[in-house]
Image (spheres, helix red, strand yellow):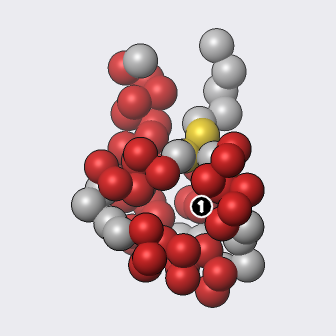
Amino acid sequence: MTNVVTVRMSHIRQATLCSRGARAWFAANGLDWSKFLSEGIAAETLEATGDPLALKVCGIAREEHLNG
């Protein structure tokens, strides 16, 4: 099992965030939205922003990673 936690669109939706806002947030933070949709993004990358909503989404992804 890998230690890299990948955040996907499903985690954003579980956090009750909208795709429009997430897309704008990705653009504002210089992150590739299209790549995220196809591959996901490492939780560490989002956590590095320190953004509270990003941290919420990463928490959901990490919990899923731990619990399967």
* Left or right of residue 67, residue 26 in this image: right
User: How many C-alpha atoms fall within 10 Å of the one at disc 1: few (<14), some, or many (≥20)?
Assistant: some
Amino acid type shown at disc 1? Leu
Task: Confirm whether residue 42 shows in the render.
Answer: no
Q: Position of residue 36 (x, y in %)?
A: 65, 55
Res 60 quadrant in image: top left
Q: Quadrant of the N terminus?
A: top right
Q: Which residue is mark 1?
A: 46
Residue at image position (37%, 20%) is 67
Q: Secondary structure at mark 1?
A: helix
Q: Residue at x 44, y 76 (%)?
A: 20
20 or 63: which is nearer to us?
A: 20
The residue shown at (54%, 82%) is: 24
Q: Quadrant of the C terminus?
A: top left
Q: Is residue 42 left or right of residue 25?
A: right
Q: Residue at x 73, y 78 (%)?
A: 30
Which residue is the extreme one toward the left? Answer: 16
Is 27 situated above or below 56?
Answer: below
- Residue 22 against residue 58 in the figure, above or below: below
Give x and y (percent) for residue 18.
Answer: 35, 69
Say whether residue 11 is visible.
yes
Identify which residue, 37 or 51, lies in the foreground: 37
Identity of the residue furthest to the bottom in this view: 28
Indicate the position of residue 13 as horizontal and vertical percent values: 34, 54
